[in-house]
Image: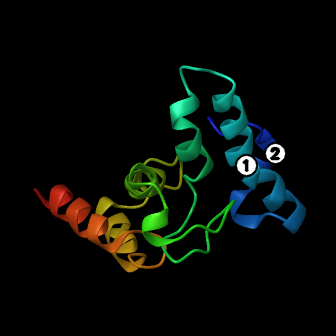
């Protein structure tokens, strides 16, 4: 499914992970970072791979980075990834309008509020 280092078993139950499974799942950021650092063609993306699950309020992982300390590209990716995950999940897809409401609700918590405004304006057009 594209999450390196994550077993199909863990991926199949993401909504109901034990603490041990959650920690194992969250290691995919660090695994991807280490892989990227070994390749001259990918090294410039390593920090973005590492921090792609950080939250605007600092409660993301793996580093607990927050606000503008999260790379700009990661803040954009977080919004787009969440939208795609909500609207394109096999068997669990939600309506696009509801996904946009959820992204708006998570502004200043999970997402950069300024980028949320821009994303919502883009999606409205």
Q: Residues within 10 Å of mark 2 (few under 14, many from 20)?
A: few
Circle count: 2
Residue 103 drawn above or below residue 31: below
Report the quarter where the N terminus lies: top right
Q: Residue at x 42, y 67 (%)?
A: 68
For mark 1, what is the residue? 12
Q: On the image, which quarter does residue 115 sit in?
A: bottom left
Residue 78: x and y in percent read 45, 56
> SS for tag 2?
helix
Residue 63: x and y in percent read 67, 62
Whether residue 17 sits left or right of residue 75 in the image: it is right
Whether residue 87 sits left or right of residue 53 in the image: it is left
C-beta proximity under 8 Å, tags 1 and 2: yes
Whether residue 43 sits left or right of residue 67 in the image: it is right
Q: Residue at x 58, y 20 (%)?
A: 40
> SS for tag 1?
helix
For mark 2, what is the residue? 9
Residue 15 drawn above or below residue 90: below
Residue 55: x and y in percent read 53, 68
Q: Residue at x 43, y 76 (%)?
A: 106
Q: Nearer the viewer, residue 101 or 54?
A: 54
Residue 30: x and y in percent read 72, 45
Q: Residues within 10 Å of mark 1 (few under 14, many from 20)?
A: few
């Amino acid at each position: 499914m594209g999450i390196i280092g994550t077993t199909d078993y863990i991926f199949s139950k993401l909504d109901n992970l034990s603490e041990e499974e959650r920690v194992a799942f969250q290691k995919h950021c660090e695994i991807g970072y280490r892989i990227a650092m070994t390749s001259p063609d990918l090294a410039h993306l390593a920090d973005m791979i590492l921090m792609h699950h950080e939250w605007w309020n600092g409660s993301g992982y793996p580093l607990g980075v927050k606000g503008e300390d999260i790379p700009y590209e990661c803040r954009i990716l977080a919004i787009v990834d969440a939208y795609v995950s909500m609207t394109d999940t096999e068997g669990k897809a939600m309506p696009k309008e509801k996904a946009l409401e959820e992204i708006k609700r998570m502004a200043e918590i999970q997402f950069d509020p300024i980028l949320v405004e821009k994303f919502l304006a883009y999606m409205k057009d």
